[in-house]
Image (cartoon, helix red, strand yellow):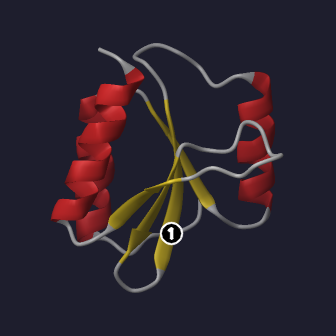
Amino acid sequence: MREKEIESYLRDRIRRIGGKAYKFVSPGNNGVPDRLVCLPGGHAVFVELKAPGKAPRPIQIHQIGMLKQLGFRVEVIDSKEQVDEFVKELSGNAVSPA
């Protein structure tokens, strides 16, 4: 399975629970997470998507760490099953920082 398939699956699942999964691009800031998930109630979660079994690159790890230091929740997801778990949690609970 390719990363793009997981990303599309995430976008569709988030839409079903009333949220948006915006493609996140920040010129001049390599390694930022792929998606910014915005949910009803003003909650936001950054999501880095990977192909199954792949790990974030060092620049991505750095960017994830910086976002977490600012108090944001950042998830790394590499399967449709992880998307399902993530969406189930979001639809049943308030979103809390990592």
Q: Is residue 61 above or below residue 70?
A: above
Locate residue 26, reporting x and y percent.
71, 52
Q: Which residue is drawn at 50% across and 69% down?
A: 44
Most distant residue in the bottom direction? 41
Q: Residues within 10 Å of mark 1 (few under 14, many from 20)?
A: many
Q: Which of 16 and 61 is in front in this view?
A: 16
Residue at position x 32%, y 31% in the image:
6
Left or right for 80, reference 59: left
> Which percent across, then down, holds residue 86?
33, 50
| Amino acid at the residue labelled 1 | Ala
Look at the picture and state if 52 lies above or below 36.
Answer: above
Query: Is residue 52 toward the left or the right of residue 16 in the image?
Result: right
> In this orientation, which residue lies closer to the viewer: 39 or 89?
39
SS for tag 1?
A: strand
Q: Quadrant of residue 95?
A: bottom left
As drawn, the residue found furthest toward the front would be: 27
Quadrant hosting residue 87: bottom left
Question: Can you say which quadrant of the picture contains the C terminus?
Answer: bottom right
Q: Residue at x 76, y 49 (%)?
A: 27
Q: How many numbered markers are drawn?
A: 1
Could you tell me which quadrant the N terminus lies in?
top left
Residue at coordinates 23% horizontally, 62% vertically from top-left? 15
Determine whether 97 is above or below 35 in the image.
below
Q: Specify the quadrant of the image occupied by residue 69.
A: bottom right
| Nearer to us in this view, 66 or 16 | 16
Percent x, y of residue 39: 37, 73
Q: Where is residue 20 in the image (x, y as percent from the top left)?
A: 35, 65
The residue carrying mark 1 is: 44
